[in-house]
Image (tube, rainbow, N blue to C red):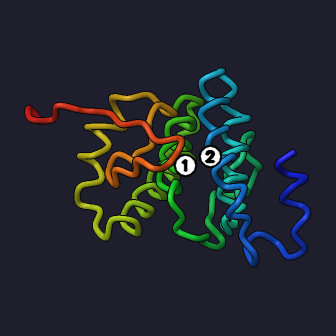
Amino acid sequence: MLKSAADTWGPPADKVPRLELFATWRVLISVYDSSRRQRKAIDVALNALKCIGFVLRGASLPLEPGVDFEIVKYGIPFHGVLQIWICLWQIYRKLRASELSEKAYASARTAYLIHFGEDATFRVNLEILGMKIDVGIFLLEDIFCLNTTAPDTYIINLDVSGV
């Protein structure tokens, strides 16, 4: 149904992003991942990125022979992009797609840099949050930004004093 809605726009998503559909795609990632349908979660994540203007090549499973992962065009640095890259990184790791996992990790780091203006704290924050909490449980940006108005926001109180 979401793909049908996206098709109602004339121009492609990299020209006219489908911002209204992004949040729904984003929520579906954790639904599919938590129901152990990781390949579907990957497809949904890639569709979420596509609807905000990303053009990706070689990010789907199964891998296409001779097609390397590439971000052909970056999309809008919209709220939730960092979470999607982290989810992709985690899901690719679960499926032992190491090359894609590394590319998604690098893309998550780039999204973090764009969103927060630095990436020196990226690894530390992943260790505090991302590595200890399974994918789909939280929205990393919501924790950092404390965006309590979003309907899909989870507030997590972490004691990081010993870190």
| Residue 158 horizontal/vertical position (percent) | 23, 32
Q: CA distance from mark 2 to mark 1?
A: 7 Å
The image quadrant of residue 6 is: bottom right
User: Do residues under tags 2 and 1 come within 8 Å of each other at their CB atoms?
Assistant: yes
- Label 2 crowding class (10 Å Cα cut-off): few <14, some 14-19, many 20+? many
| Residue 22 horizontal/vertical position (percent) | 66, 55
Q: Which quarter of the figure is the N terminus placed in?
A: top right
| Residue 21 horizontal/vertical position (percent) | 72, 55
Q: Is residue 97 left or right of residue 67?
A: left
Mark 1: amino acid = Ile
Q: Which residue is mark 2?
A: 26
Depth check: give the residue in front, 101 or 118. Answer: 118
| Residue in view at x 27 percent, y 46 percent | 125
The relative height of residue 146 versus residue 13 in the rendered view (above or below) is: above
Q: Which quarter of the figure is the C terminus placed in?
A: top left
| Residue in view at x 47 percent, y 54 percent | 82
Q: Is residue 37 left or right of residue 160?
A: right
Q: Which residue is mark 1?
A: 84
The relative height of residue 146 versus residue 73 in the rendered view (above or below) is: above
Mark 2: amino acid = Arg
| Residue 79 horizontal/vertical position (percent) | 50, 59
Q: Which comes sooner in the sequence, label 2 or label 1?
A: 2
Checking the image for residue 140, the label placed there is: none
Depth check: give the residue in front, 82 or 157. Answer: 157
- Label 1 crowding class (10 Å Cα cut-off): few <14, some 14-19, many 20+? many
| Residue in view at x 90 percent, y 74 percent | 10
